Image (tube, rainbow, N blue to C red):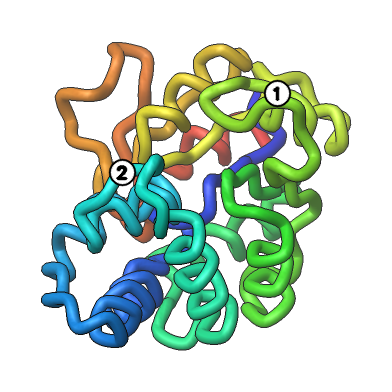
């Protein structure tokens, strides 16, 4: 019986890649470095700020300037948070249908709370989120199942009653380990159909899922 939905944030509900493209290339311009291709940045968004700094500046974490550049990147991101990002097509419709079916829902993300909470507060369609779990709340972030299990506990749900939506291998690993149904969002930043296990649900488009696959929830809500 499906009683709740949990989502990753970046690359799953929120297309935040344009924010990261702007911030990284602005920083590269400041240091008179060539810009990085937007599609390439997009494919690494789910890997976090450290990876984006390494990608753009072509350095590793042991570089003497790495921490300074990472801090500058995060400061730039904080000052431009949500400026260019939008919810993916179908996210609003899926959240609305979730509420109409009296299902619980929440977000489990590897984005730090200071950023994730502000995005949720400033995005009306996300404001009904019933729980937000970030790395700040955990001993181990995804691919550990700790965050998903914490969210299930906060919503008073058995993991078997929950579908977790994510766009990265870390999301799939965390979901499977937690015992939730796994919805692999191949429209996002880092997954393709070949990454799925047999029991995973492929989500090519949230609007399509809301219209056609939501019967999975209608039957058990």
Residue 20 drawn at (x, y percent): 37, 70
- Left or right: where does residue 73 sit relative to residue 168? right
Image quadrant where residue 195 sits? top left
Residue occupying image coordinates x 49% and y 33%: 216
The relative height of residue 147 versus residue 208 in the rendered view (above or below) is above
Q: Is residue 95 in view from this perspective?
A: yes
- Left or right: where does residue 134 sit relative to residue 15? right
Viewer-side residue, 48 vs 173 = 48
| Label 1: which secondary element | helix
**Disc 1 designates what residue?**
146
Residue occupying image coordinates x 54% and y 66%: 71
- Estimate the spatial distance between the alpha carbons at disc 1 and disc 2, rounded to whole Å: 29 Å
| Label 2: which secondary element | loop
Count all numbered tags in the image, as a single digit: 2
**Disc 2 designates what residue?**
60
- Left or right: where does residue 164 sit relative to residue 203? right
The relative height of residue 167 versus residue 177 in the rendered view (above or below) is below
């Amino acid at each position: 019986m499906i009683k709740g939905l949990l989502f990753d944030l970046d690359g799953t509900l929120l297309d935040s890649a344009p924010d990261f493209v702007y911030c990284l290339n602005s920083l590269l311009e400041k240091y008179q470095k060539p810009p990085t291709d937007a599609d390439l940045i997009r494919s690494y968004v789910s890997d976090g700020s450290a990876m984006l700094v390494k990608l753009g500046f072509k350095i590793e974490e042991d570089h003497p300037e790495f921490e300074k550049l990472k801090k500058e990147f995060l400061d730039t991101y904080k000052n431009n948070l949500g400026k260019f990002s939008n919810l993916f097509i179908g996210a609003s419709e899926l959240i609305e249908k979730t509420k109409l079916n009296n299902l619980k829902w929440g977000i489990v993300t590897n984005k730090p709370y200071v950023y994730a909470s502000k995005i949720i507060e400033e995005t009306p369609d996300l404001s009904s989120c019933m729980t937000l779990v970030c790395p700040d709340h955990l001993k181990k972030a995804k691919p550990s199942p700790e965050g998903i299990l914490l969210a299930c506990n906060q919503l008073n749900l058995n993991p078997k009653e929950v579908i977790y939506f994510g766009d990265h291998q870390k999301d799939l690993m965390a979901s499977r380990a937690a015992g939730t149904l796994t919805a692999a969002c191949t429209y996002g930043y880092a997954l393709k159909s070949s990454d799925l296990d047999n029991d995973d649900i492929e989500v090519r488009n949230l609007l399509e899922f809301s219209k056609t696959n939501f019967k999975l929830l209608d039957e058990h809500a």
